[in-house]
């Protein structure tokens, strides 16, 4: 993302829209984006309304208001001159956009967003079966950000447990070797808003996986959100919840697949 | 829609997202009609937000504002549910957000009867979601639990701000914007309803719950 200095009037409206605080008004009086901090989520461009006014007019009005000691009270989500401009991104910087802009569609998943369909279509795909647990380990959320080097720390630790990463997941697609969890070196320093690591394990392995993720989390400079799902047993029971209770987790919120998708995986 | 899972805070009741999604390569051919039908059904039960995952939600910015719009206070912060529905042109996640369990139950009954064949999920408090499913005569297939946040929790913002920003799991509702509108509400320069709409706009999926945000922003008046 780029803010056109010829158009920007330094109103600073865009600053709070940046989830990672990468925008600031510089010494020249116009807003600039810190390219190292920017995760290319395009939120500043997408979420603000634009008036497309001539910059000279806005600057004159702002100066006049300053001279008169008036405090303008504009709507807070308007870029008066449309100065925020998307720019073409090249490799490896483009991965920032793929993992930060929710409207970007990954070629691997075909799904807009950072993960896959996981439990959402489990009734139709049968990805995670009875006796198994699917994990969605999200790094960088909410609004903290993460580098691929930190993601690799997690994936390499999980690979040591012998787990297989979900092949259609965008993070898996960037691994040099999914068996080791090592990620391509040319993107390790790229910073993104968040990424989801996905895999399925037998229910018995849930405690080991959770211990490992919790342990790795303590040495990361980011936040880790853990989601774990299972297919309910035919009798309605759910052995995963018992395991989570034993480990001291008391989940309050969940995403529940109602089983209304057709054709059902079990029937195909 | 893992983006709906990790919503922080004590106010889980009154915060449900119901969404329909096709499985890629299995039942996504011609799914747009079914996804549109799902949102049409959901829109009958007064959702507080809706989205199609690609075009945007009910609350969205205006691309080309007339400068006089601001003076005449005729800004349109919200589009019609029909526009969100008609923007569905292919496989996507069609979502509707509700502030009551009863509405979720009614939507589930209607969707079950319509037998659209899309996978339907409800993201919400576990007990309320299961009760709604039970009342609708549905036996849930799979469940994903939120085990919440780990690691550098000191990097997270203060609790009410965290509660606001986690309503957009993609992280598009910035903590800085949440703090800014909270101050403006306290200063009396925005109503909590207006502030909640400003926060809802960056969330393209329609998962942000402006009704819940309004309650939080009202409470934040007394917070500083």
Image: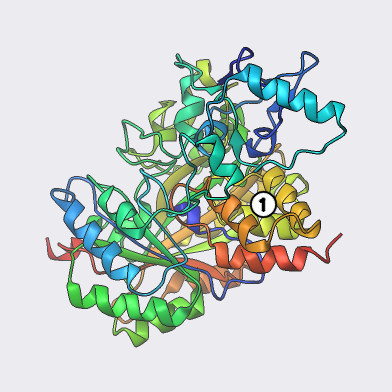
SS for callout 1: strand
Color scheme of the displayed model = rainbow
Residue B31 visible within the image: yes
Q: Nearer the viewer, residue A245 or B176?
A: B176
Q: Which residue is identified by label 1? A: B150
- Image quadrant in which you'd find residue A259: bottom left
Q: Residue furthest bottom?
A: B135
Up/down of B95 relative to A150, above or below = below
Q: Is residue A10 among the parts visible in the rendering? A: no
Numbered-mark total: 1
Local crowd size for mark 1, using a 10 Å CA cut-off: few (<14), some (14–19), many (≥20): some
In the shown orientation, is residue A7 left or right of residue B183? left
Q: Position of residue A243 (x, y in %)?
A: 52, 69
- Residue at figure coordinates x 18%, y 49% from the top left: B28
Q: Is residue B163 above or below residue B136?
A: above
Q: Quadrant of residue A57?
A: top right
Residue B19 percent location from the top left of the image:
35, 61
Q: Residue at x 19, y 61 (%)?
A: A265
Q: Nearer the viewer, residue A231 or A255?
A: A255
Which is nearer the eye, A213 or B146? B146
Q: In the image, A151: left or right of B51? A: right
Taking the image as shown, residue A143 lies to the left or right of residue B91, namely: right
Image height check: is A177 above or below B170? above
Residue in the foreground of this view, choosing between A98 and A10? A10
Chain where mark 1 sits: B
Residue A261 falls in image quadrant: bottom left
On-image quarter of the C terminus of chain B: bottom right
**Residue B11 percent coordinates (x, y):** 63, 72
Q: Residue at x 79, y 25 (%)?
A: A64
Can you give x and y, in whole percent of width and height, for residue A58 in the image? 66, 24
């Amino acid at each position: 993302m780029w803010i056109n200095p010829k158009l920007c009037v330094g109103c600073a409206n865009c600053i709070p829209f940046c989830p990672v605080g990468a925008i600031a008004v510089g010494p020249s009086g116009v807003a600039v984006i810190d390219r190292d901090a920017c995760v290319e989520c395009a939120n500043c461009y997408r979420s603000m309304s634009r008036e497309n006014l001539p910059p000279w007019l806005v600057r004159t009005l702002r100066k006049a208001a300053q001279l008169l000691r008036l405090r303008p009270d504009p709507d807070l989500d308007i870029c008066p001159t449309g100065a925020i401009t998307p720019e073409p991104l090249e490799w490896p910087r483009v991965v920032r956009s793929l993992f930060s802009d929710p409207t970007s569609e990954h070629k691997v998943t075909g799904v807009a967003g950072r993960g896959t369909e996981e439990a959402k279509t489990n009734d139709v795909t049968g990805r995670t079966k009875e006796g198994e647990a699917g994990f969605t380990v999200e790094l960088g959320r909410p609004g903290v950000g993460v580098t691929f080097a930190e993601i690799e720390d997690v994936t390499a630790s999980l690979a040591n447990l012998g787990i297989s990463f979900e092949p259609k997941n965008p993070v898996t697609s960037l691994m040099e070797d999914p068996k080791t969890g090592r990620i391509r070196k040319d993107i390790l320093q790229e910073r993104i808003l968040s990424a989801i690591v996905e895999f399925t394990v037998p229910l018995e392995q849930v405690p080991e996986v959770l211990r490992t993720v919790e342990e790795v989390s303590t040495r990361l400079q980011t936040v880790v959100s853990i989601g774990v799902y299972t297919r309910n047993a035919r009798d309605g029971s759910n052995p995963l919840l018992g395991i989570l209770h034993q480990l001291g987790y008391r989940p309050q919120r969940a995403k529940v697949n109602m089983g209304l998708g057709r054709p059902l995986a079990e029937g195909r | 829609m893992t983006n709906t899972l990790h919503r922080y805070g004590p106010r889980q009741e009154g915060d449900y997202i119901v969404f329909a999604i096709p499985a890629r390569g299995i039942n996504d051919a011609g799914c747009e009609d079914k996804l549109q039908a799902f949102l049409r059904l959901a829109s009958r039960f007064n959702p507080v937000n809706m989205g199609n995952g690609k075009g945007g939600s009910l609350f969205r910015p205006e691309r080309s504002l007339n400068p006089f719009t601001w003076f005449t206070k005729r800004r349109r912060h919200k589009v019609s549910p029909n526009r969100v529905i008609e923007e569905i042109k292919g496989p996507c996640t069609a979502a509707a957000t509700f502030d009551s369990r009863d509405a979720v139950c009614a939507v589930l009954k209607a969707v079950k009867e319509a037998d659209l064949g899309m996978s339907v999920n409800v993201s919400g408090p576990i007990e309320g979601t299961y009760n709604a499913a039970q009342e609708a005569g549905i036996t849930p297939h799979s469940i994903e639990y939120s085990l919440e946040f780990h690691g550098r929790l000191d990097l997270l913002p203060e609790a009410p701000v965290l509660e606001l920003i986690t309503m957009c799991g993609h992280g598009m509702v910035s903590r800085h914007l949440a703090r800014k509108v909270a101050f403006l509400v306290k200063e009396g320069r925005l109503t909590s309803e207006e502030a909640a709409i400003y926060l809802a706009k960056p969330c393209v999926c329609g998962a942000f719950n402006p009704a819940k945000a309004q309650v939080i922003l009202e409470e934040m008046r007394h917070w500083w």
